[in-house]
Amino acid sequence: MKKTFLLALAMLSLVCNLQANDYSTPGDGKAYSFETLAGIAESGVSITDGTYVVNGTVTIALGDEFVIDNGATVLFADAAELVVKGKADLRAATPTLLGRLGESTSCYGLNIQSEEVTEVSNLTFEYVGLRGGTTAGMNVSDCKFLNHNGTASGALFLGGNGASFKVENCEFENCQKAAIGGAANFFCPLLVENCTFKMNSQANGNVPQLNLTASEDITIRNCVVEGDSTLTMVGGIGIANWFGSEGMNVCIEGCEITNNRYGITTMGIMDVVIKNNVISNNKFEVNPNNGGSGISLYDPYYKQKAVISGNIIEKSLWGITVIGCGDVNLGKTEVDADASDYNPGGNVFRDNGNNGVLYDIYNNSANTVYAQGNIWNVSTQDAENIETVIYHKTDDPSLGEVIFMPAGDPQGVSPIRSDYEFQTKVYDLQGIRVTHPGTKKGIYIVNGKKVMK
C-alpha cells in the first residue's frame, strides 16, 4: 500500500512537471524574449551561466510578440519548442545560436505561426530547425542550418498555404533530411538566392537536398548544391507538382549542382526555365535505370514545358532524360530570334553515360524535342557523330525525335565556365562556405589562407 502511494505521488509529480513545461503567454500585448521568459518560473525556460534552456513547449500567444535575444545561446531539451503565434522579430544584430541540450535528438527549435511576415537573420540553427507555419511568410537571410536532426522534413520547413518565403545568403549543411522542404499540399512561393547546400539528407532516404512542391513561383538562383557521394538516394534539387494544377513557374539559374544522385528533377505540370548552371558529377545512383541524370524532366500529363539553355551538363549517368512532358526546348535556332520559342541552346554536354554508352539526351517520350545550338560530347559536331550520344526515334520508333542540327559552335561556347573550377571560394572558421564574405567583418579562409576583413 505504501509503495502504491509513493508511486502515485511520483506519477503526480511527473505530470505536474510536464504541465509546468507547457506554457503560453496570456496574449495581452506584451513583448517577450528568452531573457524575459527565463524570469517567469512556470515558463519552463531557465538560464545557467548565460545559456538559456527551453525545457518544454513555450507558446507566444496571438496578440503578444517575441523578440530574439542578440548574441544569445539557446538550447532545447527533448521535444522542446518555441511556438510563436503572435508577432515575431527574429533579426539578431550579432550571431545567435539555437541548439540542442546535450545529446537530445527530438528537440524542435522554432515554430513560427504568425499572421504577419516574419524577418529572420543572423541565426545559427544547430540540431534544431525553423518551421514556418506562418500564413504570411518569412524572409530568412544570413542564417546557418547545421546538422538538423530530422524532426521535420526540412531544416527550414515551409508551411502555411500561400505563404511566401525568401531565403538569401544562407548555409545548410549535414542535415538529416532536406535542407528546405514542406508539405506537399501547401502552395508556398519561394525565392532561394545566394545560398549554399552541402551534404544534406544524411538519412539517405529518397529525398533531395531541396525538396520542393507545387507553387505559383519557385526561383533558385546563384546557389551551390553539393552532395555527399556516399549517399546513393539523395538528389540535388527536386521540384514536384503532385496535384495536376496548372500555373506553376520554376526558374533554376546560375547554380553549381555537383556530386548528387541526380542534379535536377522536375515532376508534374509546370513551366520550367533551367539556364546557365553547372551540373556536374551527379551520378551516385547504383542502378542507372533508377536515376543519375543531370536533368530529369517527368510529366505523365504531357503538359510540362521546359526551356533549357546555357548549362554545362557533365559526368552524369544520363545528361538529360525526358519522360512524358509537353514542350521541351533545349535549343531552337531555326526560328527568328524574336520568336516566342526561340532558344539559342548553348548547352554543353560532356562525359555523360553509363555501362560504356554515352547518353547526352535520352528522349523517353513520344514528343519531338528541339535541341539545336548545343555542343555535344563528340569530337566533330556533325549529324553522324551527334547521333551516337542521343537516344530517340532513330533508336526506338515509338519515341519522339530529337532535332539537334545545327549544332553549336565549339569556338563560341566555353566547355568550362571560367568561374566554376577555378573560382575563389571563401569559408569561415567552421569550414562553412561564405557566399558574400564582403558584407561582414571577421576571419575567413580564402583558398586555404587566413584573411582578416
Image: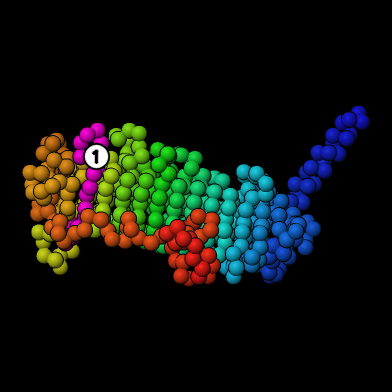
Q: Is residue 223 left or right of residue 54?
A: left
Residue 379 or residue 60, whichever sits in front: 379
Question: Which residue position is annotated with label 1?
Answer: 353
Q: Is residue 407 left or right of residue 268?
A: left
Q: Is residue 139 left or right of residue 387?
A: right
Q: Is residue 306 left or right of residue 371?
A: right
Look at the image and say whether residue 353 sits in the magenta stretch: yes
Residue 120 or residue 143, whichever sits in front: 143
Residue 156 in the image, given as x and y percentages of width and height? 51, 54
- Write down the quadrant of residue 50 in the picture: bottom right
Residue farthest to the front, as pictured: 449
Residue 293 in the image, given as x and y percentages of width and height? 29, 43
Q: Residue at x 31, y 61 (%)?
A: 419
- Structural crowding at the residue carrying mark 1, measured as other residues with C-alpha within 10 Å and reported as few (<14), some (14–19) or many (≥20): many
- Write down the quadrant of residue 1 in the picture: top right
| 332 shown above or below 453 | above
Q: Residue at x 25, y 56 (%)?
A: 416
Q: Main secondary structure of the magenta part?
A: loop
Q: Residue at x 48, y 42 (%)?
A: 202
Residue 408 in the image, given as x and y percentages of width and height? 14, 56
- Is residue 10 among the parts visible in the rendering? yes
Residue farthest to the right, as pictured: 2
Residue type at tag 1: Gly
Q: Residue at x 78, y 43 (%)?
A: 15
- Is residue 170 among the parts visible in the rendering? no
| 115 shown above or below 19 | below
Look at the image and say whether residue 69 sits in the magenta stretch: no
Highlighted range, magenta: 341-358
**Circle 1 SS class:** strand
Residue 318 or residue 12, whichever sits in front: 318
Residue farthest to the top, as pictured: 1
Residue 197 in the image, given as x and y percentages of width and height? 44, 53
